[in-house]
Amino acid sequence: MFLVPPEGKLVITDSHPEQYHLNSKITRVSAVAGLSHGVQSAPVINSNVIYTKAENDLGCNLVNSRKRAREDDDIRVNSRQQQQQMLNMEYHPNHGSVSVPPSTTGVSTGLRLSFEDDRLNSTSSASTSGRDISTSFMAAVGDDLNTHLQQQREEVELFFKLQGEKIRQQLEEKRQRYSRALIGAIEEVVLRKFHEKDLEIEKLKRQNQELVKHAEQLTVETHHWQAKTKATEALVTALRANLQQAQAAVAFSREHSKEGCGDSEADDAASSHHGDAEDMHARTFRENRELREQRTCRSCRCNDVSILLLPCRHLCLCKDCEARLDVCPLCQTLKNASVQVYMS
């Protein structure tokens, strides 16, 4: 309980100490507000001294001229003392009051002549105690602030660490997705290239097989033509031999036709065999006619034969008629090839 006498002294009684605990939050806010404005609070003097009305009147008469000038200061000091008392009660809840070092007072003559000294001493002691308590309070506040700042710093570091880890994971996931997409695109391109190459290989295989078949067919045709050529050469050789025989027979017949009949024995012998010569001549003439017919083109009957037709192997056409005819004039076989023969 607080009592404020007329001279400005603050009197505290211990009748209701629980009020300090009830107003602890208000006191804390007031103390912080006072410290934030740079005002030092003075401790409240725990005193049970109550001045009588006569002493108060006498003191007031002596210092009446100064009291008005300091009245506002005393009110502010009392307010500070009250705030400091509330702070002390909060930080020291087991004590009913805050002890203040005893101040040295002058000898009272009953006229309150030492009032000024008492007030100055009380103010000085309150200021010193206030500075000490303010220093302790600031140290405690600084420790709390440092602890809070350290906690906040750790939380911020943890937050940044978590965010960094999250960002790293996101970047890693993006990198993996990009890598998978890139690998998928590359695989798609490579597979498409492989498919194209496989198609080209299949095409080349088919072409190779076709070429092999064509080569085999050409080989067979080559053997066939070689056989035909050999047969043709044999036929030509035979025809040439027949032709030579025919030419020899013609020459022989011409020689015998030029000879006349004489009186010599040789002539007699020739005449004796005249009948045989005529028979030979007729036979030779027939052979020559047959050979001439064989050497004459069976189409135009004018030019000599020079084309051997295949596959029937008939030597029966000249070069001019071979271009016009597609079948053999002797056997009516379809012509698929022809060979030119040079007759000597």
Image (spheres, rainbow, N blue to C red):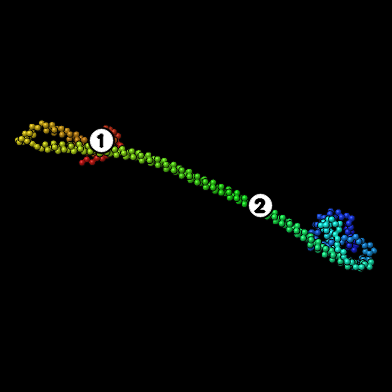
Give the spatial CA distance, label 2 vs label 1.
106 Å
Mark 1 Cα-neighbour bin, 10 Å: few <14, some 14–19, many ≥20: some
- Residue 85 position by quadrant: bottom right
- Residue 216 position by quadrant: top left
Residue 162 is marked as 2
Work out whether 32 lies above or below 249.
below
Query: Where is residue 236 shown, x and y percent of the image?
Result: 23, 38
Query: Where is residue 1 shown, x and y percent of the image?
Result: 88, 57
**Quick one: 141 or 181, which is closer to the camera?**
141
Please name the amino acid that badge 1 sits on: His
Please name the amino acid that badge 2 sits on: Leu
Residue 314 is marked as 1
- Residue 268 seen: yes
**Quick one: 296 or 252, which is closer to the camera?**
252
Q: Secondary structure at mark 2?
A: helix
- The residue sitting at 75% across, 59% down in the picture is 142
Q: Secondary structure at mark 1?
A: loop
- The residue sitting at 35% across, 39% down in the picture is 217
| Residue found farthest to the left | 263
Which numbered disc, 2 or 1, marks the residue closer to the eye?
2
Query: Where is residue 10 shown, x and y percent of the image?
Result: 88, 61
Q: Is residue 93 left or right of residue 323?
A: right
**Quick one: 297 or 98, which is closer to the camera?**
98
**Quarter of the figure that contains the C terminus:** top left
Mark 2 Cα-neighbour bin, 10 Å: few <14, some 14–19, many ≥20: few
